[in-house]
Amino acid sequence: MFVKKLSIIGFIGISLCLFYGCEGPEGPAGIAGQDGVDGVDGVDGIDLTGLSPAGTYFSLAVNNNAGDMQFGSFVNYLSFDTMNTGVFSTVPQIVSVKTETPPEIDGISATGEWSGSGTTVTLERIEDYEKYDGISPVGVTSVSVSSMYDETYIYFKLSWSDADESDEKDKLAYDGSSDSWSKSGNEDRFYFMFPITGYSGTDFADGNGCAAFCHYDESSANGKGYMFTEFSDQLVDTWQWKASRANPVGYIHDKHLIYQDVAAFDASADKPKSFSGRKGDQGLDTYVENKIQSDGFPLYMHAKDPDASAGYPSFVWDMVPFDTSASFSDAATIPGVFLRYPTGSGSDVVAYGKHNGSGWLVEVRRARNTGNGDDHQFVSE
């Protein structure tokens, strides 16, 4: 009887681990990363009752990763309650209206849930230097944007046409003939960029928006493009909705752009990924990458592998270290990313999108004032 009770207890414990995900044995410590960059102080202690947020310039882009092409609008303006007549007529302007009925963030625009029909923003091809040379642009050329706010949150709704639902980022596949792994597949995405500090003028990044952050070091042998702000006092809030790496857990990948001192790097050297000014906000982000290592093996596999060919989404509690002795069948696949729930400032922006066969509809919510220095605050002036 005692043995049976222990067996039942053990079964329950195993079941709970499989359902909720139990912490495994601690692995070896990794290499210490570089020191982060101090953020600016957040905006605390402000009573938002009855106050409209201050208008702001921002940038917007949409990636159609079935066509591997990014289109965007460098400079737009977000106003509140009424149009800002001081903004040039050539700048797309989205008016955020106050609401008493917050939308449900579920990727469905229910009747009466959103005010107005939204503003259509025309997008142009964003050059990525030689990456797209010689290929025809295949991208999203317009997006409808709506916004509302209440005393606590700001909301956005975006919708765009895209016949292909791309939501399997970097899927890993086994080639039995060569005994090797390769990755393929990408994801649909959209980006917001809001100024935080260093933009005291009326026009975001001197009228260039995100174009001011796309830098290319032509003297570099590696030919990589990087993004970072131009001056040390500048900081930019970036929201990245990712169909594969964020959407299934209901969040946006919340990041920010910092300044990088180009002169501090050897122009002829192959600059590391850390040279990019794109940094994640404090806390965990929404995913863990499953990269192919220098020995040719993936870093992780699904708990049901080999040959589970697990689909997307897969989560960190499905993830185990890759077994190099495991035998995989030809064309077996492993997820290229494993999802998790973000924490800290990385969990500020809630979002969820659905693809209806012809395009995406994504709904977004974020607190007007997060109190975090790596965020733009939607508060009154």
Image (cartoon, rainbow, N blue to C red):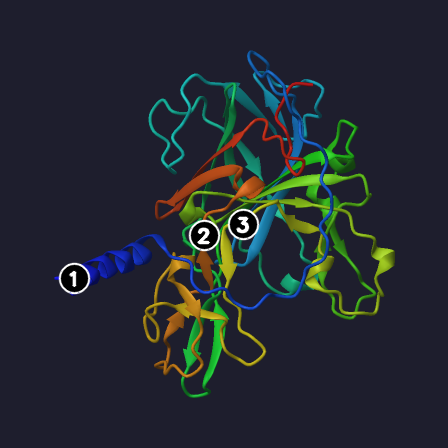
**SS class, disc 3:** loop
Percent of width and height locating residue 362 = 44, 39
| Separation of residues labelled 2 and 1 (CA atoms) | 38 Å
Residue at the spot of label 1:
2
Percent of width and height locating residue 203 = 75, 30
Percent of width and height locating residue 361 = 42, 40
What amino acid is at disc 1?
Phe
What amino acid is at disc 2?
Arg
* Camera-side residue of 134 and 347: 347
Q: Earlier in the sequence, mark 2 or mark 3?
A: 3
Q: Is residue 21 visible?
A: yes
| Separation of residues labelled 2 and 3 (CA atoms) | 8 Å
- Quadrant where the N terminus sits is bottom left
In the displayed image of the protein, which residue is found farthest to the bottom?
177
At horizontal 69% and vertical 40% (from top left) the residue drawn is: 236
Q: Is residue 140 visible?
A: no
- Quadrant where the C terminus sits is top right
| Relative vertical location of residue 339 with respect to residue 81 in this rendering, above or below | below
Percent of width and height locating residue 247 = 44, 47
Residue at the spot of label 2:
340
| Location of residue 377 (image quadrant) | top right
| Relative vertical location of residue 119 with respect to residue 32 in this rendering, above or below | above
Q: Is residue 372 left or right of residue 102?
A: right
* Camera-side residue of 189 and 253: 253
Q: Earlier in the sequence, mark 3 or mark 1?
A: 1
